[in-house]
Image: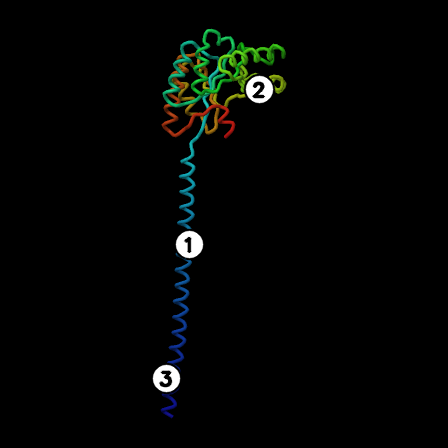
Amino acid sequence: MQAVGNWLIWKRKISLGVILGIFLFYLGQGTAAFLLLKDRGIRSAWQEEGAEIGAAQRREGQKKTIALTFDDGPHETWTPRLLEGLKERGVKATFFLMGENIAGNEEIVRQMSRDGHLIGNHSFKHVQLTKAGMDEVCASFEKTGAMIEELTGSRPMYVRPPYGDWNEELECRTNLTTVLWDVDSLDWSYKNRRRVVNKVCKEVEDGDIILMHDIFQSSEEAALEIIDRLQSEGWEFVTVDELMID
């Protein structure tokens, strides 16, 4: 009887040991699984965070592009100074020329073309085109376009209507691409370099077209300061046609 009792006790200990071993085994497996899942979770979080950082870095690496445009020129004094400043900074701009201002400033127009700027048509005189007769409007653009072509060898394909005054009928008749603007510098009103610079730099966004005029000293100075400030922040200046292609 005592031997049988000892056997039962021993058997019970074995059973408890086996059960305990099995329990510990699965506990270990569960802990390992938990740690694995936790590790995967951490890795996944790291990966997601890394992807977000990488995307942000890529976005930061992309330059923001804008186009500087100038109306009403050429001016015998301020346009050459502006061209010189643009060349020093490696910037190309778009000039919408007024036909009546070309006479006597032909070499300035040729310089624009040689420097790689885009030249557009701003009609012959600064009048509201929708209030003029259709024939007069078309003749005005035709005359200005022919003057520019004679000086540069290329007829302008882009038009900036004075005051932005335009309609679909005029566009169809002239067969020119209309270019308006996103940011009006109000340089024609302010005639103050600091106010113009602050307004443009505050309002400009990626892909914007900026309206300025190259017939005022304050505008010439403001334009170059705008370029200096925005270039230092990573902005890139392009011509209107390049902006439209992008």
User: Label 1 sits on what residue type?
Assistant: Gly
- Please, is residue 106 above or below residue 227 in the view? above
Pick the front one: 38 or 242: 242
Left or right of 179 on screen, residue 201: left
Q: Nearer the viewer, mark 3 or mark 1?
A: 1
- Please, is residue 229 above or below residue 122 in the view? below
Residue 179 at what x, y percent from top left?
53, 21
- Please, is residue 32 above or below residue 22 in the view? above
The kind of secondary structure element at disc 1 is helix
Residue at mark 1 to residue at mark 2: CA–CA distance: 59 Å
Q: Which residue is mark 1?
A: 41
Q: Quadrant of residue 187?
A: top left
Residue 145 at what x, y percent from top left?
54, 14
Residue 53 at what x, y percent from top left?
40, 42
Q: Are marks 1 and 2 in contact (CB under 8 Å)?
A: no
Q: Quadrant of residue 3?
A: bottom left
The kind of secondary structure element at disc 2 is loop
User: Label 2 sits on what residue type?
Assistant: Leu
The label shown at residue 10 is 3
Q: Which residue is mark 2?
A: 176
Q: Residue at x 39, y 86 (%)?
A: 8
